[in-house]
């Protein structure tokens, strides 16, 4: 804590951002703002629908509500600060604010990675073992799955935040990113951080490949179960349910692996910033759209909610 107080009394960090004030970048900034607004509204709406409709109180939608909560916090962790800095021209962020951004970002990305893996396992149990599903995915098991996902992310986030923020930083303290991204921040350290970066790389491999392996194994078994189904309609319905999850998984893991599993010599700051926009803003927007527009239960709950609002307004 003393180190934090000593560091926070020195200069703030400067976030160089991703946008300039050129006409092209102003258009791109406007697009990001639209995507951010849709992500915010979409995830809030999905949370209200899931918790407000008793028919959506099932394991799959409970996991989906937690995914929406993670996405909601994720977009609110980095984007508002980026917007304020761009509009005001003031690019600084406090030492403590930088630490909070790192902790929340690592926590949420880690938690979401594990949750997506568990969601794939949930679909595998529902399709391959439907008769045992209520027992295998009981309320207690669901709470343990969600709790462990959050716990993994929080522990990882706190450890990385504390270690990174205890390093001494010098020079201009300019972070070549639009938020306090850990790898970009480590470039400003006054000491050699290569050992820590190697440890982080190993952690990323574990945090990404473990849930990704669970996901791929689950869908391999799902595909096998679908091919053995006698009813073509049942098989088509099962694949339709899983295709939305596969889309979300591909977007999330693809972007995360591109950022954190590339060798250091292949990292280009401009590429990293663009991909970071992709999975910190675009993916949280696409998740509610993917799961709602392709899901009859969610669309039914939405129509029910709109009808209720219309009837209430007439009275």
Image: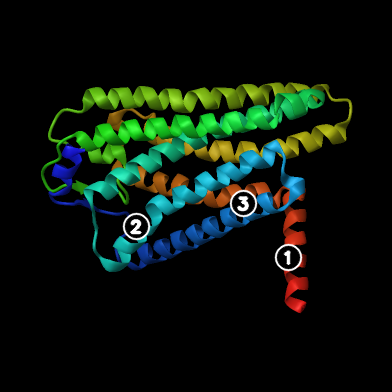
Label 1 – label 2 distance at C-alpha: 34 Å
Q: Secondary structure at mark 2?
A: helix
Q: Residue furthest right?
A: 231
Residue 118's image quarter? Answer: top right
Q: Are marks 1 and 3 in contact (CB under 8 Å)?
A: no
Q: Nearer the viewer, residue 143 or 296?
A: 143
Question: How many other residues sit within 10 Å of disc 1, few (<14), some (14-19) or many (≥20)?
Answer: few
* Residue under pointer 3: 47
Mark 1 lies on a secondary structure that is helix
Nearest to N terminus: mark 1 or mark 2: 2
Horizontally, residue 136 falls left or right of residue 81, namely right
Q: Position of residue 141 (x, y in %)?
A: 64, 27
Q: Earlier in the sequence, mark 2 or mark 3?
A: 3
Residue 226 x, y percent position in the rendering: 78, 26
The structure residue drawn at horizontal position 44% and vertical position 59%, both measured from the top left corner, is: 32
> What is the C-alpha distance between the residues marked 1 and 3?
15 Å
Nearer the observer: mark 1 or 2; the answer is 1
Mark seen at residue 82: 2
Please tell me which residue is depicted at 20% across the width and 35% down the height of the picture.
166
Query: Position of 115 compared to 224: left or right?
Result: left
Residue at image x 70%, y 29%? 138
């Amino acid at each position: 804590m003393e180190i934090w107080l000593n560091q926070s009394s020195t200069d703030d960090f400067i976030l160089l951002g991703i946008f300039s004030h050129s006409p092209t970048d102003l258009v791109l900034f406007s697009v990001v703002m639209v995507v951010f607004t849709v992500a915010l509204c979409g995830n809030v709406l999905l949370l209200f629908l899931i918790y407000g409709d008793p028919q959506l109180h099932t394991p799959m939608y409970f996991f989906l509500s937690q995914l929406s909560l993670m996405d909601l916090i994720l977009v609110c962790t980095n984007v508002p600060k980026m917007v304020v800095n761009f509009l005001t021209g003031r690019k600084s962020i406090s030492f403590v604010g930088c630490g909070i951004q790192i902790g929340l970002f690592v926590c949420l990305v880690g938690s979401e990675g594990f949750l997506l893996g568990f969601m794939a396992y949930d679909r595998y149990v529902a399709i391959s073992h439907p008769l045992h599903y209520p027992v295998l995915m009981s309320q207690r098991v669901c709470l343990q799955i969600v709790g462990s996902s959050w716990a993994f992310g929080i522990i990882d986030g706190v450890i990385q935040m504390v270690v990174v923020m205890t390093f001494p930083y010098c020079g201009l303290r300019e972070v070549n990113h639009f938020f306090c991204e850990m790898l970009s921040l480590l470039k400003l350290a006054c000491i050699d951080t290569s050992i820590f970066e190697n440890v982080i790389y190993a952690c990323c491999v574990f945090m990404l490949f473990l849930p990704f392996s669970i996901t791929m194994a689950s869908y391999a078994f799902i595909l096998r179960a679908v091919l053995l189904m006698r009813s073509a309609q049942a098989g088509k319905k099962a694949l339709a349910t899983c295709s939305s999850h596969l889309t979300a998984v591909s977007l999330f893991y693809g972007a995360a692996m591109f950022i954190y599993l590339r060798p250091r010599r292949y990292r280009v700051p401009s590429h990293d910033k663009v991909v970071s926009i992709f999975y910190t803003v675009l993916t949280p927007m696409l998740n509610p759209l993917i799961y709602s527009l392709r899901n009859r239960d969610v669309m039914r709950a939405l129509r029910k909610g709109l009808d209720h609002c219309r009837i209430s307004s007439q009275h």
